[in-house]
Image (cartoon, rainbow, N blue to C red):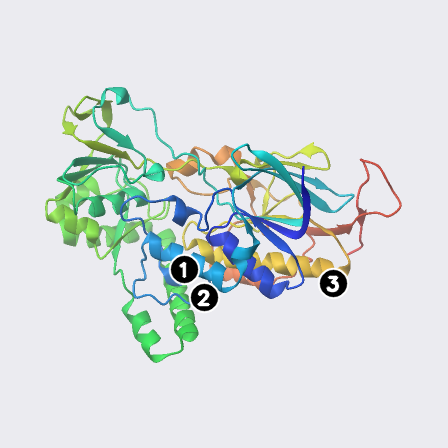
Amino acid sequence: MTLEHFDVLIVGAGLSGIGAGYHLQKNCPGKSYVILEGREAIGGTWDLFRYPGIRSDSDMYTLGYSFKPWTEAKAIADGPSILKYVRETASDNGIDRHIRYGHMVKSASWSSEDAAWTVEAETGPSKERVRFTCNFLFMCSGYYDYEKGYTPEFKGAERFKGRIAHPQKWTEDIEYVGKRVVVIGSGATAVTLVPEMAKKATHVTMLQRSPTYVVSRPAEDGLANWMRSKLPAKLAYAITRWKNVLLGMAFFKYCRAKPAKAKQMILQGVREQLGSEFVKKHFTPSYNPWDQRLCLVPNGDLFDAIKEGRASVVTDHIDTFTEKGILLKSGEELEADLIVTATGLNLKVLGGMEIDVDGRHVDLSDTMSYKGMMYSDVPNLASAFGYTNASWTLKCDLTCEYVCRLINHMDETGTKQATPRLNDPEVEEEPWLDFTSGYVQRSLDKFPKQGSKKPWKLYQNYALDIMAMKFGRVEDGVMEFSKPSATRTGADREPERLAS
């Protein structure tokens, strides 16, 4: 079994992993690093998902990297444009030369004696095991299962004569032109699929069990495009980025403070498009705004498809699949040639990687999340996670900067190990995410907890995170720094503690 050593090992060559490579090169230029990617391509989510109309549900001025201006006209970008942007970032900065494709990470073992992780991955058709060692392990593999999406057990599914497809496994041979299509679901994927497929299908029906908040927004940011024509690209991008960040934070705060008014404001926007009765039946959720993520429809494309009769919405429960389609609890039957199960994702902690620290298995559900990126009693390991109420990359950029600060601090102090320690008895456990979405609730028990106070509390607030992660003290009394002892030997050797 081969063995290579790097200062930092990054898992995942998607949006987060490429960003991590950039920040390491900029802020820790002397450090060697490698990116292990389980698939054969850069891009992560944006290379995996190929369903019709795939696009972001965040604006690219905040989903884009802080260091690389988004220069295309569309703020709500399609998947291929985002993939091109990520690949350009990797190529322009030489990050792509650090990627090892087809390396599926399976396990990581920390040794305090060596102050190093040993990481094992499978590669090639024969799944040959290869090993790497690193001083810091940076997980940029997202939080969902790339192997399969979530599809509930539908009674009678085997009877259906047409095709059943999940968006996560979309292939080019899935025919929908001139077909009758039923899309099961009401989340971001469903509201993307329906208007796009309705352009070529005979008819598309969005079948939902319960409504979701849907907000229309211009596909282009007129002010951003104007500023880009008048100002240097980086300045225009920075101004637009902060404009969108502040507007997003203000809207989220308003939704939390005055949920009833926020609900009426959102519904009024849909009511103007589709009428009161339609909105009451199909677009009025039972929960408050931002208890689940809002769905974005650029230029109201979903509403246009419904008004033009190319698409429709049915709110009901499925009784059984039939030979012709789906029989509903109400007795109505929806006939279809193609059924698309836009029913969600399966979440997976750290890509399913097994972890042990000094020979002890770590169950991450027993740990507490430090600043939303590290784990109690797990040294030199960080994860890139985005926000639930804002763009993924905003938090990932901050996480990358903090990881670099942490690495540089260890170099400056001659320490080798940084471990978050939960020693405050006043910190109470809370769920990792305060989100009612089904995909979160189904898997919440597998994820770490968060705490009731900082630095264990997830505030989902970009401004607060800037203060904590960019300017806050690295030695905060919670992060414990240590180095291997030169006087003790053996498997049970503990690191020497440094006085703070």
Q: Are marks 2 and 1 in contact (CB under 8 Å)?
A: yes
- Crowding around mark 2 (Cα neighbors within 10 Å: few <14, some 14 to 19, many 20+) is some
Q: Amino acid at mark 1?
A: Tyr
- Crowding around mark 3 (Cα neighbors within 10 Å: few <14, some 14 to 19, many 20+) is few
Q: Are marks 2 and 3 in contact (CB under 8 Å)?
A: no
> Which residue is nearer to you in this view: 129 or 197?
129
Q: Residue at x 16, y 24 (%)?
A: 324
**Disc number at residue 85?**
1
Q: Residue at x 40, y 52 (%)?
A: 389
- Report x, y in % for residue 265: 25, 54
- Report x, y in % for residue 23: 56, 61
Answer with mark 2 or mark 3, whichever residue precedes in sequence: 2
Q: Nearer the viewer, mark 2 or mark 1?
A: 1
Check disc 2 and report the residue beneath it.
Answer: 68
Camera sees residue 134: no
**Disc number at residue 480?**
none
Q: Are marks 1 and 3 in contact (CB under 8 Å)?
A: no
- Establish if 17 lies above or below 27: above
Q: Amino acid at mark 3?
A: Glu
Camera sees residue 233: yes
**Alpha carbon separation for disc pair 1 and 3:** 35 Å
